Image: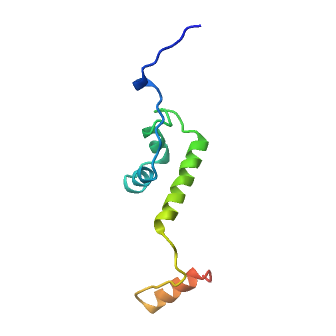
Amino acid sequence: MEVRKIRPSQRNQRRPIPDRALVDAVCLQGKTIAGVLERHGWKQPGQPAAGQHIKALRAALCATLDRMIGPVTSGLQVQGSEDIAQAMQSWARGEG
């Protein structure tokens, strides 16, 4: 059996994907989840991304955005036209 030696710089080095890097890449830079996976070594260029990696990253993105929104208060305050304010408040109560 022949042992192949691969330089560390040529190995598929998977790096962790920080929440901030994920949000910045997808929401601010317009990258796809597959693009984020490729940039961090979780996907080979030209190859499709693994489904479980896409699902995990999508879940991480959703959780991070939920944390960023902070606590949601029950009192909805809408400024502007009374019609718009009433429509938004009824929508928030699930009536419309």
Residue positioned 41% across, 50% down in the render: 21
**Hey, which residue is sitting farthest top in the picture?**
1
**Camera-side residue of 71 and 92:** 71
In this picture, is 42 found above or below 25? above
Q: Split into 4 quadrants, where in the image is the C terminus?
A: bottom right
Residue 85, position in %: x, y? Answer: 47, 87
**Camera-side residue of 47 and 70:** 70
- What colour scheme governs how the chains and residues are painted in the rendered image of this protein? rainbow
Residue 86, position in %: x, y? Answer: 51, 89
Residue positioned 45% across, 48% down in the render: 18
**Hey, which residue is sitting farthest left in the picture?**
29
**Hey, which residue is sitting farthest bottom in the picture?**
82
Q: Split into 4 quadrants, where in the image is the N terminus?
A: top right
Residue 14, position in %: x, y? Answer: 48, 35
| Quadrant housing residue 35 | top left
Numbered-mark total:
0
Residue 36, position in %: x, y? Answer: 45, 44
Residue positioned 52% across, 79% down in the render: 73
In this picture, is 50 found above or below 59? above
Is 22 positioned to the left or the right of 53 in the image? left
Residue positioned 43% across, 52% down in the render: 26
Is 25 positioned to the left or the right of 50 in the image? left
